[in-house]
Amino acid sequence: MSNIELNEEVKIIRNIIKDVESFYNKTMTFLNDISVIYLKNLDPSTISYFYDLKDDYLEIKEIRLGDYLEGKTGKLLHKVPKNQTAGGHPTLKDGVCFGPPARLLGDR
């Protein structure tokens, strides 16, 4: 290592708005790529759960991946007021969760 003396104060000037926007876009692209890989490797007959958040409630629908990809809406399982939901699932794509349904408060 060499020692360098700086005669002037060194400043790094960044545009935080552009940095955050760039980070967000790269993160969302990365997550989308992962979800595409995940969905390509999932059996189309796998039963999955669709979460649709309305103004006052959460709809939980059951659907097969193949049906979802064909544009079908699935079968309504639960219609839960917002304040009664807890938990969830981290694997989301366009509001669709391919995994177990969310826990409801009181379901333990």
Image (cartoon, rainbow, N blue to C red):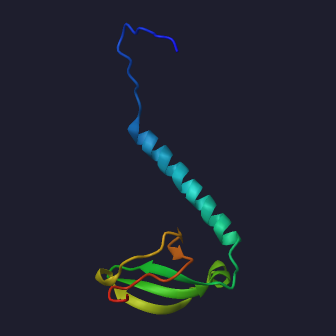
Q: Residue at x 55, y 78 (%)?
A: 99
Q: How many marks?
A: 0
Please determine whether, in this image, residue 14 is positioned above or below residue 29: above
Relative depth, front residue between 108 and 6: 108
Locate residue 11, reporting x and y percent. 38, 21
Q: Residue at x 46, y 46 (%)?
A: 21
Q: Quadrant of residue 44?
A: bottom right
Q: Residue furthest left?
A: 83
Locate residue 49, reporting x and y percent. 53, 83
Locate residue 77, reporting x and y percent. 47, 92
Locate residue 67, reporting x and y percent. 65, 84
Please determine whether, in this image, residue 80 is positioned above or below residue 40: below
Q: Residue at x 61, y 65 (%)?
A: 35
In this image, 27 relative to 14: left or right? Answer: right
Q: Quadrant of residue 17?
A: top left
Please determine whether, in this image, residue 8 is positioned above or below residue 55: above
Q: Quadrant of residue 36?
A: bottom right
Q: Residue at x 59, y 61 (%)?
A: 32
Relative depth, front residue between 52 and 87: 87
Which quarter shows the C terminus?
bottom left
Q: Residue furthest front?
A: 1
Please determine whether, in this image, residue 3 is positioned above or below residue 21: above
